[in-house]
Image (tube, rainbow, N blue to C red):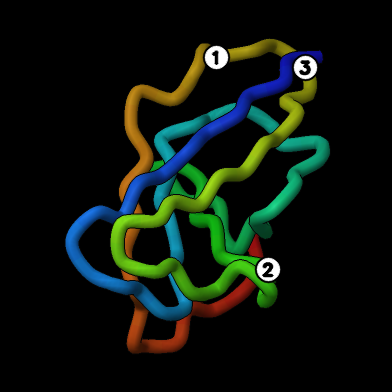
Amino acid sequence: MTLVRWQLLRAKKAMENWYALMDFHGEVAEIWNAEVCQVTEEGILLKNVGWNQDIEAGASVSFEFRGEGEFPGVPAKCVLWQVSRQIKKGA
């Protein structure tokens, strides 16, 4: 079991309805303050959980997850963005 905490900063302008793509290729057993939306070859697509969907200018958002099985290492990057198109939910 491995617990990873990630904090994403949004310095310049506010963001509504954030998503994040994390280059993690292990199994997520539990996650807090985000939701796994999709698993792809690029990594895991995460989305907000409603109450934290908007990030004010200069603020940050953080989430934690617990990995299951063999731990492939802490993700090297996690890209945060605002999505205006609909993303299909599922693995």
**Helix, strand or loop under label 1:** loop
Disc 1 marks a residue whose amino acid type is Pro
Instruction: Answer left or right for 64 relative to 46.
Output: right
Numbered mark located on residue 2 in the image: none
Q: CA distance from mark 2 to mark 1?
A: 25 Å
Please tell me whether residue 67 is drawn above or below residue 84 in the rendered image. Answer: above
Q: Is residue 67 above or below residue 33?
A: above
| Residue at numbered disc 1 | 72
The residue sitting at 45% across, 64% down in the picture is 19
Seen from this angle, which residue lies furthest left?
Answer: 12
> Which residue carries the number 2 mark?
49
What crowding class fits label 1: few (fewer than 14 Cα within 10 Å), some (14-19), or many (20 or more)? few
Judge depth for marks 3 and 2 and give the one in front. 2
The amino acid type of the residue labelled 3 equals Gly
Q: Nearer the viewer, residue 15 or 74?
A: 15
Taking depth in this image into account, of 5 and 47 the one nearest to the observer is 5
Q: Quadrant of the N terminus?
A: top right
Place of residue 28 in the rendered image (x, y in percent of width and height, measured from the top left): 71, 36
Q: Is 34 placed above or below 90 here?
A: above
Seen as rendered, the residue at the extreme bottom is 85
- Mark 2 touching mark 1, by CB under 8 A? no
Residue at 55%, 64% in the rendered image: 47
- Disc 3 packing (10 Å; few <14; some 14–19; many ≥20): few
Q: Nearer the viewer, mark 2 or mark 1?
A: 2
Amino acid carrying mark 2 in the image: Val
Instruction: Identify the residue at image location x=49%, y=32%.
Output: 24
Where is residue 38 shown, x and y percent of the image? 57, 60
Where's residue 4, x and y in %? Answer: 63, 24
- Label 3 sits on residue: 69
In primary-sequence order, the first of circles 3 and 2 is 2
Residue at horizontal 64 percent and vertical 13 percent from the top: 71
Q: Position of residue 12 (x, y in %)?
A: 18, 61
